[in-house]
Image (cartoon, rainbow, N blue to C red):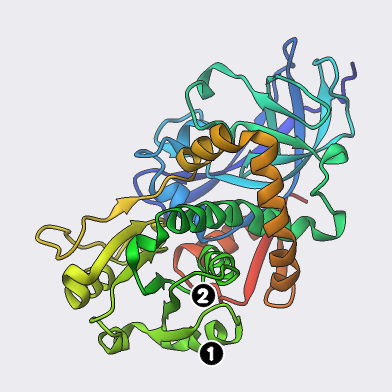
Amino acid sequence: MAKAGILKAWDFEVARGDLAVTRIVEHELPPLQDGEIRLHIDRFAFTANNITYAAMGDSMAYWRFYPAADPAWGRVPVWGFADIAESRCDGLNPGERIYGYWPMGSHATLKPGRITPASFVETAEHRAGLAAAYNSYTRCAADPGYEAAFEDLQALLKPLYVTSFLIDDQLADTEYFGAEQLIIASASSKTAFALAHAAHQRAARPRIIGLTAESNRGFVEKLGCYDAAVSYDALNSLDATKPAVFVDMAGNGPVRNALHGHFRDNMKFSLMVGLSHRDKRASMADLPGPKPVLFFAPDRLKVRGQEWGRDGLNSRIDAAWRPFVRAAAGWLKVSTGHGPDGFARVYAAMLDGKAPPAEAWMLATA
């Protein structure tokens, strides 16, 4: 047991009623209780996926993971690395590096349970009933998939890759509903090209088509995991006589509706994943083709975890992850924002959809 004498912390908070409004809240840290650990958050990824967390904060309970003192405000959860700064929990000592789900801020306090050499779970009362995938923390020293040189890419891409792996697994499990085309919207997004990369490895797969803004089409073509890249204003050029599956990574309602209207009954399945285009919603009343289904990764994770076992699931994900992360290292330029000012600048750019697809952002507390 050890105490580090930490007194101050700060949090980056978002107005739940207007995601464009943010603030920094400074506060004192209370003494740890028995069984708790306090971690200094070092660095974490910030992507369009985190904007989806904020946009769906109420409907999907993302605000509950790290609730703000004022319920009108929220703390956006993020994936990254932290170091144990203080511990009153047997088996977890100061200095250990942990990968997992954090708030945007300088510190987090957890109450670990089910502690093993490789991981632990958060057992705080306010997180009871939340998705297990978000309540599990990895002890880096015992993680066979951890490589210090790839920390940034792990934080940036591993959570997204797991989602993409599970979407690919679900679609392949259904033989793509008999579709001859897999159409992925927001094709330049990290979750999208991770899905395209996973699907591209399969011997039996439909043609993979990336829908993207004209300005991003060159980037999408260079990725090498799409069979074709089509701009949104040219989606009517897609062959509507061939059955298709649609994966919507951004929640662009007009694009979704236009695509359904184009394919009509030849749209065999429609999956909603992200909501970064929260300002482009559209009614789904009288939408031709199947009703879009919301994908929630923890549900699929639970299914495969029961069928394959935790070790079997993790080994499959890790085996697919290794070639992807090395490919992604050649696609992405990783930049780092520092401290509260960096948080605010990168958050605003991501909220406005202004981040270039070839650029990825890490945020560091110092």
The answer to which quarter of the image holds residue 229 is: bottom left
Query: 318 left or right of 285?
Result: right
Q: Mark 2 sits on what residue? A: 188
Find numbered disc 1 in the image and state the secondary structure of the residue it sits on: helix
Question: In which quadrant will I find the N terminus?
Answer: top right
Whole-percent x, y for residue 40 in the image: 77, 37
Between residue 22 and residue 51, name the one nearer to us. Answer: 51
320 lies above or below 112: below
Q: Residue at x 87, y 20 (%)?
A: 3
If you read the primary sequence from the N terminus, does the residue marked by circle 2 or circle 1 appear first?
Answer: 2
* 333 lies above or below 55: below
Residue 251 visible? The answer is no
Task: Name the residue that disc number 1 marks.
Answer: 218
Tag of residue 164: none
**Compared with residue 150, is residue 133 higher up or lower down, i.e. above or below?**
above
Judge by depth and name the residue closer to the eye, 341 or 148.
148
Q: Amino acid at mark 1?
A: Gly
Disc 2 crowd rating (10 Å Cα; few below 14, some 14-19, many 20+) is many
Q: Amino acid at mark 2?
A: Ser
Is residue 231 or residue 350 the one in the foreground?
231
In the displayed structure image, the side of residue 326 where residue 132 appears, left or right: left
**Residue 162 in sight in this render:** yes
The image shows residue 193 at horizontal and vertical percentages of 55, 70
Element type where label 2 sits in the image: loop
Residue at figure coordinates x 46%, y 36% from the top left: 63
Which residue is at a point 82% across and 21% down the rendered structure image?
A: 87
Please identify the quarter of the rendering in which residue 6 is found.
top right
